Image (cartoon, rainbow, N blue to C red):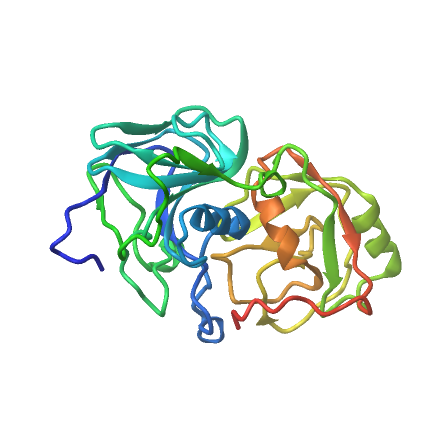
Amino acid sequence: MPDISESPILEVTDPGMGVSIQDLGRIGWRRFGVPMSGAMDDHSARVANVLLDNPPDAPVLEMLLQGQRIRVLKTCWLAVTGADASSTVADWHAVQVLAGSELVFPVNRKGVWIYLALAGGFAGEVRFGSASVSARAGIGKMLAAGDRLYRREASHLHLSASVAGRVAAWDEQRDFLKPPVLRVWRGPQWAEVEAEARVIFFESEWEVSSKSDRSGYRLNGPGVPVPGLEMISEPVRIGSIQIPGGGQPIVTMRDGPTVGGYPKLGMIDPRDLSWLTQCRPGQKVRFRELDSEIGIVPEDRGD
């Protein structure tokens, strides 16, 4: 929580399609049924913090699509990354904004999740070791008009007075209209899914469904047949590709269930999952299998 001696830095005047505080999520609680939560696009959230010399897991604002308006109450350094919503602050930049100005995110042009970082990070109520909000789980709350935001700790950013801002490296600035083919590791039920069904999944183009949210992304396509494949519910990792009876895959996301009874064909490589989260409904994606002998899945430490 903020030092009560410090005045608020920002005020939400319009939450648009949604604003919440997120960090990199709560570690070690999924075994108790608590979702990990955290930034949907952890790559963009990290870059925003790096631009301001914050720790990578400093809390940021995560905003959905467009419509947000935020008043600056105190001159500060901010960084905006992630989806392009025609922001009044340049994307993938860190800039100083003056008290009395307003940040506006009027029209989404690409991507889904926008990230706004503050030098020093945003203060938020920490539950289970994280300030991340999970409205579905009743952990924290979405921000509303009139909510004021405080700095978590003193800023570590020290720039020369002659420096007007910072820009992220070009290879960190992603074009969300052009996602790469997403890498997939074999899942627990790989062998139980027929070879023909696996071929269908990897050789098909899939469309992100409008029925997608922080709990899971649904994919529309030809359907992956898993007739008669039944199983007892078991733990589900973030990025798991579950195949329900209808054959339309569901990718488990940050606020998704911690256990499930659908067969899991694979798991999207954690390095690529943030690409999928930034795909808007109707956008097409493809997948490729990673050879299990190439290496080990990066540990997400979220079990």
Residue at 44% x, 61% y is: 25
Please, is residue 118 above or below residue 105 in the view?
below
Which quadrant: the N terminus? bottom left
**Image coords of residue 48 (percent x, y):** 45, 46
| Location of residue 95 (image quadrant) | top left
**Image coords of residue 56 (percent x, y):** 45, 57
Please, is residue 116 above or below residue 251 in the view?
above
Is residue 27 left or right of 18 when viewed as pictured?
right
Is 216 or 68 nearer to us in this picture?
A: 68
Is 219 or 94 nearer to us in this picture?
A: 94
Q: How many marks?
A: 0
Residue at 78% x, 59% y is: 227
Residue at 60% x, 71% y is: 233
Residue at 38% x, 59% y is: 137
**Image coords of residue 37 (percent x, y):** 45, 58
**Image coords of residue 174 (percent x, y):** 60, 38
